[in-house]
């Protein structure tokens, strides 16, 4: 395995760094396979309770590498449907299906599928100099890796269409103002703010965090009645958890809770 995705293990959380800085961390099939493997490994580690995805160097991820994977060969044009389905979209499925709270720490440009990976996160922090670019249209492609879904839900139909049709870059402060990301922070503060967020989530009640992810996945599609049923079921589960018992005990004893996960 190469080192195109770096893994840092911290107490209770892991940081995954896309590591092809000379190409602004543009992704290709081997790198995506490695990313999928690192996601699976984190998921399987019961001591891991939060994940961070970021990029090495001055970019977060410039999307699909415009190289061999997408270049026509002797058999004709590349099969982008298969590429998306088996690789890019699998990353998004894993992030969204994960029990782990997923922080995207956007340290520079996030373009094409790179922007989609960023928006797949549960919490997106971005350095003020970071930009988000729906680069697909610039090369004759259409949004993928969940871009049309995330943008429509996050910023609404009018802005989503404008971003996809025009391919203009927006900066982190605009992204925050439009509700696309959680927060824009000073570039120099991004790493520390990201780590603080990861530590905070790693200490939070893990089962409840996982249930909240399930709940919000449902909220994107459900009617109010279906969502009320889902909330009731998940609250029932939470009510039976040791973390809930500890939360109530800590409140009554006027101390900070110690959640076991
Ligand atoms: O099947 C499928 O699903 C296919 C998947 C499609 C999903 C996609 O992601 S499609 C979109 C692919 N991405 C792009 O089209 C973005 C291409 N890159 C850019 O437009 C610009 O690089 C950026 C706007 C991202 C940043 O611009 P800038 O001026 O800050 O940097 P730069 O100078 O253009 O790039 C720096 C280097 O990175 C440069 O290399 P060099 O000349 O210094 O050797 C550049 O070629 C390289 N680079 C950037 N993006 C890519 C890339 N190399 C290969 N692939 C890239 N995507």
Image (cartoon, rainbow, N blue to C red):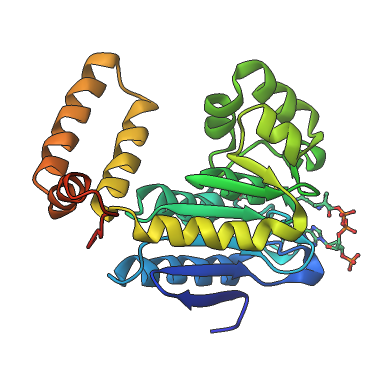
Establish if 6 lies above or below 172.
Answer: below
Quarter of the render that holds ligand 1: bottom right
Along the horizontal axis of the image, is 170 left or right of 258? right
Depth order, front residue of 91/225: 225
- Whether residue 66 is visible here, answered yes or no, is no
Q: Could you tell me which quadrant the C terminus lies in? A: bottom left
x 58%, y 46%: residue: 124
- Regarding residue 81, the answer to whether it shows in the image is yes
Judge by depth and name the residue closer to the eye, 138 or 110.
110
Between 209 and 217, the residue placed more toward the observer is 209
Q: Is residue 216 above or below residue 37?
A: above
Relative to 252, is 175 above or below? above
From the top left corner, tell me how far across and down residue 10 is, in percent.
46, 75
Q: Kindly indicate the quadrant of the structure image that contains residue 141.
A: top right
Q: Can you give x and y, in whole percent of width and height, for residue 81 in the image?
A: 55, 47
Task: Compare residues 96 and 84 and report the one nearer the observer.
Answer: 96
Q: Residue at x 69, y 21 (%)?
A: 159
Looking at the image, the residue that sits furthest to the left is 240
Q: Position of residue 178 (x, y in %)?
A: 66, 26
Question: What residue appears at the point 76 percent right and 42 percent down from the top-left corner?
Answer: 135
In screen coordinates, is 113 left or right of 240? right
Q: Residue furthest front?
A: 254
Question: Residue shown at 17%/35% (left/top)?
Answer: 235
How many discs mark residues in the rendered view? 0
| Image position of 78 (left or right of 7) | right
């Amino acid at each position: 395995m190469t080192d195109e995705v770096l893994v840092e293990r911290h107490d209770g959380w892991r940081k995954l760094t896309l590591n092809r800085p000379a190409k602004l961390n543009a992704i290709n099939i081997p790198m995506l396979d490695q990313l999928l493997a690192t996601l699976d490994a984190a998921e399987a580690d019961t001591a891991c309770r939060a994940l961070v995805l970021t990029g090495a160097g001055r970019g977060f991820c410039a999307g699909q590498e415009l190289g061999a994977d997408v270049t026509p060969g002797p058999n004709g044009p590349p099969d982008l449907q298969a590429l998306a389905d088996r690789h890019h979209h699998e990353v998004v499925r894993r992030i969204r299906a994960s029990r782990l709270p997923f922080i995207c720490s956007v340290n520079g440009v996030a373009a094409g599928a790179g922007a989609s990976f960023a928006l797949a996160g549960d919490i997106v922090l971005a350095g003020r100099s970071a930009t988000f670019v729906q680069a697909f249209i610039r090369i004759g492609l259409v949004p993928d890796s969940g871009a049309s879904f995330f943008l429509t839900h996050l910023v609404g139909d009018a802005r989503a269409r404008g971003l996809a049709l025009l391919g203009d870059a927006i900066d982190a402060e605009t992204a925050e103002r439009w509700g696309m990301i959680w927060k824009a922070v000073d570039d120099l503060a991004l790493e520390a703010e990201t780590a603080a967020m990861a530590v905070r989530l790693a200490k939070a009640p893990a089962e409840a965090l996982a249930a909240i992810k399930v709940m919000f996945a449902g909220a994107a599609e459900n009617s109010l009645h279906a969502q009320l049923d889902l909330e009731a079921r998940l609250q029932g589960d939470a009510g039976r958890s040791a973390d809930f018992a500890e939360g109530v005990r800590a409140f009554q004893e006027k101390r900070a809770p110690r959640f076991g996960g």
